[in-house]
Amino acid sequence: MTTRKLTTTEITTAMKRRNARKRREAYARGEVRASQPKRSGPPGVGDVLVDLLRERYKIGGCQQCHDLAAKMNTWGPEGCREHMEEIVQSMWDRRKGLTGWRGKLVAMASATAITDAIAEAAGKAELRKLVEEAIEIVESRAAG
């Protein structure tokens, strides 16, 4: 029995199909966001927060994270301050789906956290700081 060599076109087609399947599976698991329209104008609070999380904790976030970021962009800095607890609670509730992030967040929040309540309070405090930082960045860009 002889085997034939695959052509470059056959290899390329197979790779495209495999990559498309992997993207669909990752999207179904909530690991990647749907394509979003190009943003016009400067980044909003949600965009800045996503960038901070990506830079500091090497996480990209799920579709729900990007939906929250879009909502934060609509609210603007003052609206984000008004909705701070909603934002923090939403992020805290999704932390378990981001396994690497949960560990980093809890370690960052309190190295000696003994109970979940202490870890949660410390973690939420750190999230509030991140949201405030994102708000301050957007306000400073708008002012200057």
Image (spheres, rainbow, N blue to C red):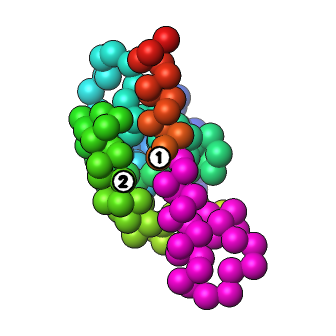
Q: Residue pushed farthest right?
A: 112
Residue position for label 2:
84
Q: Position of residue 85 (x, y in %)?
A: 35, 60
Q: Amino acid at mark 2?
A: Met
Q: Position of residue 7 (x, y in %)?
A: 51, 31
Cα separation, mark 1 vs mark 2, equals 8 Å
Q: Main secondary structure of the magenta part?
A: helix
CB atoms of marks 1 and 2 within 8 Å: yes
**Magenta-colored stretch includes residue 2:** no
Give the residue at x 39% y 39%.
46
Q: Position of residue 123 (x, y in %)?
A: 56, 66
Q: Which residues are magenta?
A: 105-130
* In the depicted structure, whether residue 15 falls above or below residue 141: below
Describe residue 34's horizontal placement relative to residue 114 as left or right: left
Describe residue 41's horizontal placement relative to residue 2 as left or right: left
Q: Where is the N terminus found, in terms of image quarters? A: bottom right
Task: Report the disc number at residue 131.
Answer: 1
Residue sitting nearer the eye, 138 or 30: 138
Q: Residues within 10 Å of mark 2 (few under 14, many from 20)?
A: some
Q: Amino acid at mark 1?
A: Val
Q: Position of residue 119 (x, y in %)?
A: 59, 76
Give the residue at x 53% y 48%.
130
